[in-house]
């Protein structure tokens, strides 16, 4: 559809040399090369991510721990400062830790009787 041959590229370079001059042309070519490199890098990353998504099979992956799978609870031990994992036998004997009551925020002053500027 859109093909650029060697003669077209040579013509574009000659016009750019005439318009920009020999002082600014090398900087422009370096900037264009840097932009092209970034575009190719982003296209490569996108292609890699799409290939990973296409080949992803959630049934083959091992199940991860979710909110439905309870984590093991620490059980009290004989020595202070050490913990042991609770087993189903000892988990029932461990009472839940009491949470301290939440502090109530201070009440906001009532400003209904202040005059409004206007």
Image (cartoon, rainbow, N blue to C red):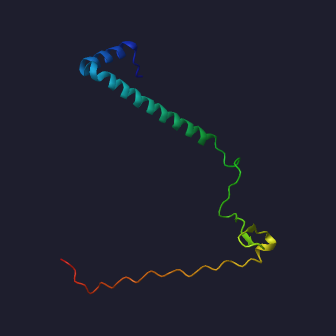
Q: Residue furthest left?
A: 118
Q: Relative to 107, is 61 above or below?
A: above
Figure quadrant of the N terminus: top left
For image coordinates 65% across by 64% down, the residue present is 67
Quick one: 78 or 35, which is closer to the camera?
Answer: 78
Q: Relative to 39, is 109 above or below?
A: below
64 displayed left or right of 33: right
Q: Residue furthest right?
A: 89
Residue 56 horizontal/vertical position (percent): 64, 43
Figure quadrant of the C terminus: bottom left
Quick one: 20 or 51, which is closer to the camera?
Answer: 20
Query: Quadrant of the rendered structure where residue 28 is?
Result: top left
For image coordinates 56% across by 40% down, the residue present is 49
Query: Quadrant of the rendered structure where residue 38 is?
Result: top left
For image coordinates 40% across by 26% down, the residue present is 33
Residue 11 horizontal/vertical position (percent): 32, 15
Residue 86 horizontal/vertical position (percent): 76, 69
Q: Relative to 27, is 53 above or below?
A: below
For image coordinates 60% across by 40% down, the residue present is 52
Quick one: 109 or 55, which is closer to the camera?
Answer: 109
Residue 50 horizontal/vertical position (percent): 56, 39
């Amino acid at each position: 559809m859109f093909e650029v041959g060697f003669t077209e590229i040579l013509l574009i370079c000659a016009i750019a040399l005439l318009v920009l001059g020999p002082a600014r042309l090398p900087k422009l070519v370096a900037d264009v090369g840097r932009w092209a490199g970034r575009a190719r890098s982003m296209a490569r990353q996108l292609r890699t991510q799409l290939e990973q998504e296409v080949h992803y099979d959630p049934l083959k992956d091992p199940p991860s721990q979710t909110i439905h799978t309870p984590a093991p609870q620490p059980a009290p031990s004989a020595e202070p400062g050490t913990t042991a994992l609770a087993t189903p036998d000892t988990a029932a004997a461990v009472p839940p830790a009491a949470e301290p009551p939440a502090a109530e925020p201070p009440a906001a002053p009532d400003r209904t009787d202040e005059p409004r500027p206007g």
